[in-house]
Image (spheres, helix red, strand yellow):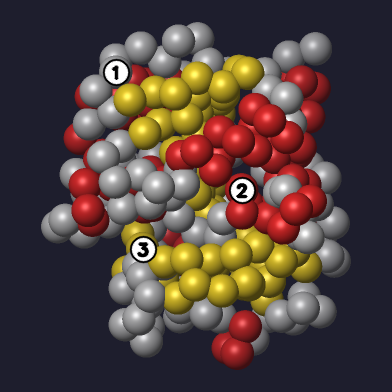
Amino acid sequence: MKFGVLIFPGSNCDHDMIYVLRDILNQEVVELWHKDTDLQNCDAIAVPGGFSYGDYLRSGALARFSPIMEKVIEFANNGGLVFGVCNGFQILCEAGLLPGTLLHNENQKFICKNQYIKAENTDTAMTLFVSKNKSLKIPIAHGEGRYYAAESTLKEMLQNGQIVWRYCDENGNLNENSNPNGSVMNIAGVCNADKNVFGMMPHPERASDPELRNTHGLIIFKSIIEYFNNKNN
C-alpha cells in the first residue's frame, strides 16, 4: 500500500507518521509538500499533526488553502482514503471534508497525556481490527481539540455511524471525567458520510513502537491496510 504524508510549514508529527508506516509496517511512503499538486498515485493520504502555519487565525485554517489540499479534496470526493490526526483532523474539518469543528479545550490549556478511547463504530477502515469492548491507550497533545457540531448534525452522524472514536476511561466507560477537553458526546474522532475520510485528535503514531511500550496505535494502522487490501483484492 502506498501512503502519501502531507507536510506543511509547522508540521511536527509528519516524520513520526512516516516512521510508523514505512519502518514498522513496511509500507511505501512518499512525502507530499504543501505546494505539490501531484499525489503521486498514492492509495491513501495521511494528514499529520503539528501546528501548520503556526495555527494562525485558527488551527488548520491556512493549511486548508495550500495547493496540495485541492488535490486531496478531489481525491477524497472520488472515494480516496484520507485520514487526519490532531492538526490533520482540524485541517480536514476546515476543508469541509469532515463535519463539525475543533474548538479550544474547555480548560483553555494545552493538554498532553495518555488518554483512553474506544471505537463507537467498528465497521470502518480505521476500526476493522478494534473490539468495541476494548479501550485503547492513545496519547493526546492539543490545545484546540474540543469537538463540536450542531445538534442536527450530530443526529445525522449518529444515524450514519460517523462517530468513530469516543474518549473513555480504562474500562471503556463514557463519563465526564474521561473527557479531557469537553468534546460534545466525548467525541475523539469522526468520519464523513461515505466513510472514506477520517479524523481523530489522539495520536496513534505515538503508540505504535514497541520501544514506547504501547502499540495500541498499530491496531488502527493495520486496520487501514487490511481494509484497503480487502477492498482491492
CA neighbours of label 3 inside 10 A, class few (<14), some (14 to 19), many (20+):
many
Q: Which residue is mark 2?
A: 205
Q: Which residue is mark 3?
A: 102
In primary-sequence order, the first of circles 3 and 1 is: 1
The residue lying at 83 percent from left, 65 percent from top is 134
Q: Which residue is mark 1?
A: 36
Of residues 226 and 32, the one nearer the viewer is 32
Task: Using the numbered discs, state the Cα–Cα distance from disc 2 to disc 3 in whole angstroms.
Answer: 20 Å
Tell me the SS state at disc 2: helix
Tell me the SS state at disc 1: loop
Q: Amino acid at mark 1?
A: Asp
Task: Using the numbered discs, state the Cα–Cα distance from disc 3 to disc 1 in whole angstroms.
Answer: 26 Å
Of residues 6 and 166, the one nearer the viewer is 6
Task: Using the numbered discs, state the Cα–Cα distance from disc 1 to disc 2 in whole angstroms.
Answer: 24 Å
The residue lying at 20 percent from left, 35 percent from top is 65
Relative to 65, 27 lies left or right: right
The residue lying at 36 percent from left, 44 percent from top is 11
